[in-house]
Image (spheres, rainbow, N blue to C red):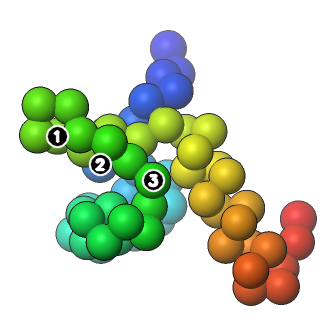
Amino acid sequence: MDSDIMTIKEVSAYLKITEKTAYRLTADGEIPGFKVGGAWRFRRQEIDAWINDRLKSNGTSD
């Protein structure tokens, strides 16, 4: 079953970046995420919105 909540490993695979980069971007507040018991979690909908915002700010559209 596809979950709306992703782990750091899943979000790094989704964005095609390393886990280390995902941790850094999240810690710097670049990627929207939240902690559960010390582990980062991400809502797929928020990640998709973040991607769309970055595309718009770069002058790229779908």
The residue wearing badge 3 is 32
Residue, far right: 62
- The answer to whether one can see residue 43 in this image is yes
What is the C-alpha distance between the residues marked 2 and 3?
11 Å
Residue shown at 71%/66% (left/top)? 53
Whichever of callouts 2 and 3 sits on the residue coming sooner in the sequence is 2
- The answer to whether any part of residue 13 appears in the image is no
Residue 26: percent from the left, percent from the top? Answer: 33, 62
Give the number of the disc on residue 39: 1
Secondary structure of the residue carrying numbered label 3? loop
- Please name the amino acid that badge 2 sits on: Ile
Q: Quadrant of residue 30?
A: bottom left
The mark nearer the N terminus, 3 or 1, is 3
Q: Count neighbours of disc 1 (C-alpha within 10 A) and say few if under 14, some if 14 to 19, many if 20 or more.
A: few
Query: Residue 8 shows which numbered tag?
Result: 2
Kindly identify the amino acid type of the residue bearing the numbered disc 3: Pro
Q: Where's the C terminus, which quadrant? A: bottom right
